């Protein structure tokens, strides 16, 4: 949901959440209990999100007739893109001094370890000048590299303000229960709409 609603063509409002929930249910059906097993036994042919470690596992365990490809997730808002997050230590830490140290560590990693990320994880490099290393050592095919890089180079995403991020996290938590009930079939669209509008009425972010 963050990947889609943070996009330029969408917005964090009740209507967009409801539209996206209906689109997900209509496009993908009921949720799978064990996505990895479902993929391994041919019950599904697409998984998202996939981090580099899971991608490597899929490559190693794939059947010969089941190719693994990198595809940006589709959305009902006309925008397809990949979504990247910062390392966990930047968002899981608590306390002013710890956050300051984590932020500084994040800046240093972004400045110096882009090549390490490209070599070890197959990630998008942290700096533009690391792109040659990404092309040379990431392990992705040319078409996969172009697909990932085009999504990043043409993107307009920016880091949110801390206050906006915290409000989004709080709102996402409030929406989790109603969305799970809707996707599992326990709640209909009218019930979902009521619960989502109620959740938005309790949060300050529009």
Image (cartoon, rainbow, N blue to C red):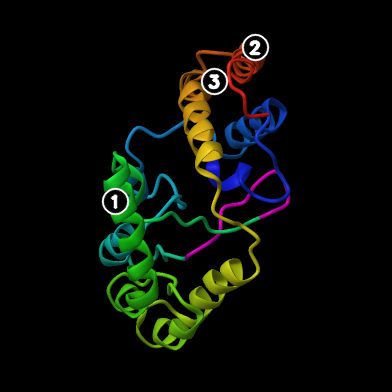
Q: CA distance from mark 3 to mark 1?
A: 33 Å
Query: What mark, if any, has residue 89 been given in the picture?
Result: 1
Quadrant in which residue 57 is drawn: bottom left
Q: Considering only vertical position in the picture, is 121 above or below 190?
A: below
User: Residues in magenta?
Assistant: 70-79
Q: Earlier in the sequence, mark 2 or mark 1?
A: 1
Q: CA distance from mark 2 to mark 3?
A: 12 Å
Q: Which of the two marks, 2 or 1, is nearer to us in this view?
A: 1
Question: Along the horizontal axis of the image, is 23 left or right of 100?
Answer: right
Regarding mark 2 in the picture, which secondary structure is present there?
Answer: helix
Q: Residue 141 location, x and y as percent?
A: 44, 79
Does residue 75 belong to the magenta stretch? yes
Sort mark 1 into few (<14), some (14-19) or many (20+) by Cα contacts within 10 Å: some
Q: Which of the two marks, 2 or 3, is nearer to us in this view?
A: 2
Query: What mark, if any, has residue 194 been given in the picture?
Result: 2
Q: Residue at x 41, y 44 (%)?
A: 43
Q: Earlier in the sequence, mark 3 or mark 1?
A: 1
Sort mark 3 into few (<14), some (14-19) or many (20+) by Cα contacts within 10 Å: many
Q: Considering only vertical position in the picture, is 145 above or below 82?
A: below
Q: Is residue 45 visible?
A: yes
- Residue at the limit of the structure toward the front, as seen here: 97
Q: On the image, numbered disc 3 is attached to which residue? A: 182
Q: Which of the two marks, 3 or 1, is nearer to us in this view?
A: 1
Q: CA distance from mark 2 to mark 1?
A: 36 Å
């Amino acid at each position: 949901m963050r990947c889609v609603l943070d996009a330029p063509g969408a917005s964090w409002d009740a209507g967009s959440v409801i539209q996206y929930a209906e689109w997900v249910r209509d496009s993908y059906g009921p949720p799978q209990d064990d996505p990895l097993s479902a993929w391994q036994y041919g019950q599904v042919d697409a998984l998202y999100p996939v981090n580099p470690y899971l991608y490597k596992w899929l490559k190693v365990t794939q059947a010969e007739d089941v190719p693994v490809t990198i595809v940006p997730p589709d959305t009902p808002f006309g925008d397809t893109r990949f979504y990247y997050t910062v390392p966990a230590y930047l968002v899981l830490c608590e306390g002013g001094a710890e956050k300051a140290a984590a932020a500084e560590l994040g800046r240093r990693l972004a400045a110096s370890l882009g090549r390490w990320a490209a070599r070890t994880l197959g990630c998008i490099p942290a700096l533009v000048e690391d792109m040659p290393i990404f092309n040379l050592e990431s392990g992705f095919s040319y078409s996969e590299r172009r697909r990932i890089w085009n999504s990043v180079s043409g993107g307009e995403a920016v880091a949110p303000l801390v206050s906006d991020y915290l409000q989004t996290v709080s709102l996402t938590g409030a929406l989790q229960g109603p969305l799970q009930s809707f996707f599992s079939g326990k709640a209909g669209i009218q019930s979902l709409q009521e619960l989502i509008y109620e959740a938005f009425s309790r949060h300050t972010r529009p």
